[in-house]
Amino acid sequence: MDATTASLIRSPLLPHDTSRNGAGPMFLTASGPGFTRSGSKHQLRLRENAFTRFSRPLQSSTTASQTRRSVVVKALAASDDASSKPIAPLQLKSPAGQFLSQILVTHPHLVPAAVEQQLEQLQTDRDSQGQNTDSSSSLPGTDIVLYRRIAELKENERRKTLEEILYALVVQKFMEANVSLIPSITPSSDPSGRVDTWPTKVEKLEQLHSPEMYEMIHNHLALILGSRIGDLTSVAQISKLRVGQVYAASVMYGYFLKRVDQRFQLEKTMKLLPGGGADESKTSVEQPHDGTYEAVSSHPEVGAFAGGVSAKGFGSEIKPSRLRTYVMSFDSETLQRYATIRSREAVGIIEKHTEALFGKPEIVITPQGTVDSSKDEQIKISFGGMKRLVLEAVTFGSFLWDVESHVDARYQFVLN
């Protein structure tokens, strides 16, 4: 950490709880001789006198004052410019979410400490509500209904705050990896009409996963891109709705893969894997005959794209992998449990992030019960851009599993 010291201050971000002697929610923010809070935006601004100790002894007071003002103006301009560029497609709306968004831009290293304070506040509020619920049993019938309604609203507020805390932690993990999230996909100003003008960062995204997990991700990419997996410069015109569906499915797939890989790595370390941890090169993948082929061929991404991608030959792209063999050993109940998103908050994050990235689709159902695709927007995207999208989505799901587990250890909310 720099010269700035971290201190706990009272914050108006959440309502104060007067039942605790007026002690309001506490948040970790940056404060010190060179910082002050300004207005309701919770921006960190440099004070002029913070630079006094660094001025030269022979410098006149007027010149020093002008220099200090110039430095302050430049610092504020840089901060405002950075704040104007969203670091993620989903903009957080709750007071706590907006606070974390500002910290992500100005002092991302303080995010974990700020999250810890907010989780403590959420736990305190939940405990307080539980005590009030026990004491409300003696209230008249009408008052009980009103009290339950208020309690429900507070619970919804806590859930929304928790959802945005999880999202902020996922964004921070991308920032730590030095990978920027793809911005909201809008009509392109590129002469070719391509929407994928974002940096590739493919190598960095690939390095964020274990070798066994990346083998599964590569197979996932093969299912989606098919024969074009080696031709990443070609451009296709694709349904934006379909691309959004693939992105959301890939997020869930990354969540599932990280959950399975975590168990796999633990058993591998403890030498509990079937076969005693034999060399992967000597491990054969036994082809199942219980309907798995139908499950693969009905993969949600297969045949999803127009413009050269088909389901033919996908089976030949599936390469044997140790993790895939491990997953095949699960019984149906275990596989179903691992494939389920554990919390409502995680489901909400996937939905909102995908909608922020691709927009809210306009789906029209015909009288015959089919989806009318006449209003489906078409976008031009290269297969390299599609690979980047899928890799980001899988990584997003993997990070979501990590932060969900981390937060649940401090504020229990996961269902299973």
Image (tube, grey):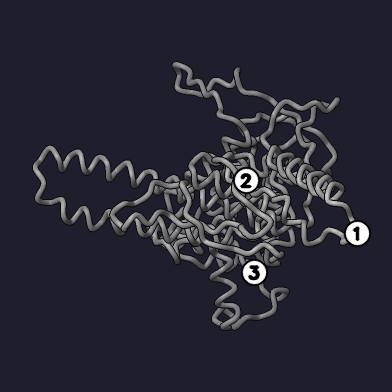
Camera sees residue 270: yes
The percent coordinates of residue 359 (x first, y second) are 60, 30
Q: In this view, does 387 lie to the left or right of 407?
A: right
Q: Earlier in the sequence, mark 2 or mark 1?
A: 2
Query: Looking at the rendered structure, which numbered label has been put on residue 322?
Result: 3
Q: Is residue 343 left or right of residue 153?
A: right
Residue for badge 2: 43
Q: In this view, does 247 lie above or below 51?
A: above
Say which element carries label 3.
helix
- Residues at marks 2 and 1 touching, judged by CB atoms closer than 8 Å: no
- Residues at marks 2 and 3 touching, judged by CB atoms closer than 8 Å: no
The percent coordinates of residue 168 (x first, y second) are 57, 51
Front residue (pair 198, 223): 198
Q: Which amino acid does label 3 sit on?
A: Arg
Residue for badge 1: 58
Q: Which amino acid does label 2 sit on?
A: Gln
- Crowding at dot 2, Cα within 10 Å, few <14 / some 14-19 / many 20+, comes out as many
C-alpha distance separating marks 3 and 1:
70 Å
